[in-house]
């Protein structure tokens, strides 16, 4: 007897669509809101690390690591995630990588 699938898990980031640019734009927006500029070169140092570590590195980069308490950092990280999720909602079928 054939088994039916009960669930399918997809890894969206870089598998179905290239989301690196979306992460970058979200981080750049949050950084700009706290008067820190980041560019693509700096953003490359954030790949593969957690949201909170990314935020910590951005704040250090901007000399602002002492300006935010843990609750404020959590709020900034949540803000970044909200921006990122909103950008995912804007994706169209054209964003799907070839061969998928």
Image (cartoon, rainbow, N blue to C red):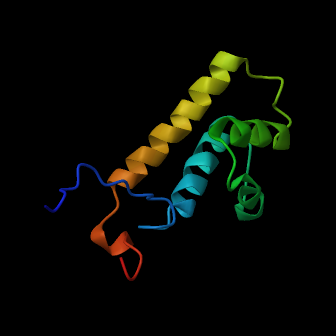
**Which quadrant does the C terminus fall into?**
bottom left
Camera-nearest residue between 74 and 29: 74
Residue occupying the far bottom of the picture: 99
Q: Count every numbered label the image shows and give the total.
A: 0
Q: Is residue 51 above or below residue 43?
A: above
- Tell me where residue 16 appears, x and y as whole percent: 41, 67
Q: Residue at x 60, y 55 (%)?
A: 24
Camera-nearest residue between 69 and 49: 49
- Tell me where residue 65 appears, x and y as whole percent: 82, 29
- Tell me where residue 70 appears, x and y as whole percent: 70, 19
Residue occupying the far left of the picture: 1
Q: Is residue 55 above or below residue 99?
A: above
Q: Residue at x 66, y 26 (%)?
A: 73
Q: Is residue 6 above or below residue 2?
A: above
Horizontal relation, residue 31 to residue 80: left or right: right
**Which quadrant does the N terminus fall into?**
bottom left
Q: Residue at x 48, y 47 (%)?
A: 84
Residue 82 visible? The answer is yes
Horizontal relation, residue 50 to residue 20: left or right: right
- Tell me where residue 88 appears, x and y as whole percent: 39, 53
Quadrant of residue 75 in the image? top right
Residue 35 visible? The answer is no
Q: Residue at x 23, y 49 (%)?
A: 6
Horizontal relation, residue 11 to residue 35: left or right: left
Q: Is residue 19 above or below residue 58?
A: below
């Amino acid at each position: 007897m054939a088994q039916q699938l009960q669930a399918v898990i997809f890894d969206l980031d870089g598998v179905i669509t290239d989301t690196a640019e979306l992460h970058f734009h979200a981080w750049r927006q949050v950084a700009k809101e706290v008067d820190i500029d980041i560019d693509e070169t700096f953003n490359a140092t954030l790949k593969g690390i957690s949201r909170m570590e990314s935020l910590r590195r951005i704040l250090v980069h901007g000399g602002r690591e002492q300006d935010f308490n843990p609750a404020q950092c959590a709020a900034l990280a949540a803000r970044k995630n909200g921006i990122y999720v909103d950008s995912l909602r804007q994706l169209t079928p054209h964003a799907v990588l070839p061969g998928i």
